[in-house]
Amino acid sequence: MNTTFTFANGSLQLSRWPLHQPNNSLQAWDAADELLIHHTLESATQFSRQHKREPALLLINDSFGALSCALAQYTQVQVNDSLLAQQGTVYNRQQNGLAVTTLQQQSSLSPYPQAPDIVLLKLPNNHSYLQYILQQLSGVLTPDSIILASAKAKDINRNVLAMFEHTLGPTSASLAVKKCRLISCRYNAALQQPATINFPLRWPLEHSVYNVVNHANVFSREKLDQGARFFLQHLPAVAEGQTVIDLGCGNGVLGLALLSRHDAINMLFCDESYMAVESARQTISENLPDKTALCRFTVDDCLSQQPDKSADYVLCNPPFHQQQAVTGHIAGQMFSDAKRVLKQGGHLRIVANRHLGYADTLQRLFGNCRQLAADPKFVILEAIKRS
């Protein structure tokens, strides 16, 4: 894995987070980071000449801290929806001898700082989340604010540029450099704002009386996804008093279904996304307010914060990508953490795409795995922690 990132002001040692990922071809930065850093250094120099001070930066979606580390000389606030992104930034600043105590990090749900001088945005794939970000920015920018965004060229299209134009102001995009493009935008305070989308969204859960709460960056924006729909048909029979973990909980729909059937089970909702955990919290509190005392909601790196032998069931719909990279290490960590956290005789039950081969992974890890159900696209697998 290449960990040496060279840019205009020097070089850094940057690692993807978590460490020790099996795909050695991946690195902790990309050409979009390089574009943003290059143009920010230019803009910062011009800003300092004009205003006789250093600019304050707002970094959004800085996945592993490449932007934060390369621009560490400037005051900055880093906004992420990912706990892993925050942890990766701290690690990379530490390994490059950069101060951590002065690093300001906040979650995607916190109010953005007022009047940032330069905004750096790594475009998310999720256009709902992009719209949320732009709406948040529209409330804190000034006409002097410089907005720079970047992504792969294929992800910057007319619709994306129109979102910037309609929400913030005049927007242009560069030619492709290393298959990435830079978006430059100037905030227009006099711009007539389009009708805003009221996040979080709420939509009816089919075949129920419930409404699911979905914040902007949570998978399955306005309807039940196919994997969750199939999983809901094959939830375990849980005994009263048992503890169930919804790992990678998203909007909390699996836990909602279980809580609606039981009066005294304990539910733990875990996800590395702040918006996901808050969506689950609101899904439960708005539909089953009398059951919230049975629930805990935790932003976590898989189950890193959870004690050994503390759960009877772990339910999981594991992802097979991190950011835009396809990788199996997250699922592997989920399965390993589940085994540690399960009591003897505890069950891990997952839904997964058929082609991913998780049955073999679970067989090696637990010594057993059975297929409970299958359809043309998905399988339901279960492994038991034996003594």
Image: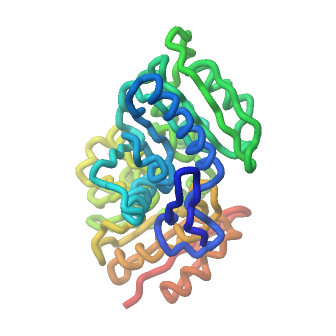
Q: Return the residue nearer the eye: 149 or 270.
A: 149
x and y, in percent, of residue 233 in the image: 55, 58
For image coordinates 36% across by 53% down, the residue present is 259
**Can residue 244 be seen at all in this image of the molecule?**
yes
For image coordinates 55% across by 85% down, the residue present is 363
What is the count of numbered marks?
A: 0
Q: Quadrant of the C terminus?
A: bottom left
x and y, in percent, of residue 368 in the image: 52, 86
For image coordinates 32% across by 55% down, the residue present is 99
Say which quarter of the image contains residue 155.
top right
x and y, in percent, of residue 162 in the image: 67, 24
Check the image and name the residue furthest to the left.
293
* Model colouring: rainbow
Q: In the drawing, does residue 223 fall left or right of residue 280?
A: right
The relative height of residue 106 versus residue 30 in the rendered view (above or below) is above
Q: In the drawing, does residue 228 fall left or right of residue 283?
A: right
For image coordinates 46% across by 37% down, the residue present is 211
Q: Return the residue nearer the eye: 340 or 26.
A: 26
**Can residue 198 be seen at all in this image of the molecule?**
no
x and y, in percent, of residue 210 in the image: 44, 39
Q: Quadrant of the N terminus?
A: bottom right
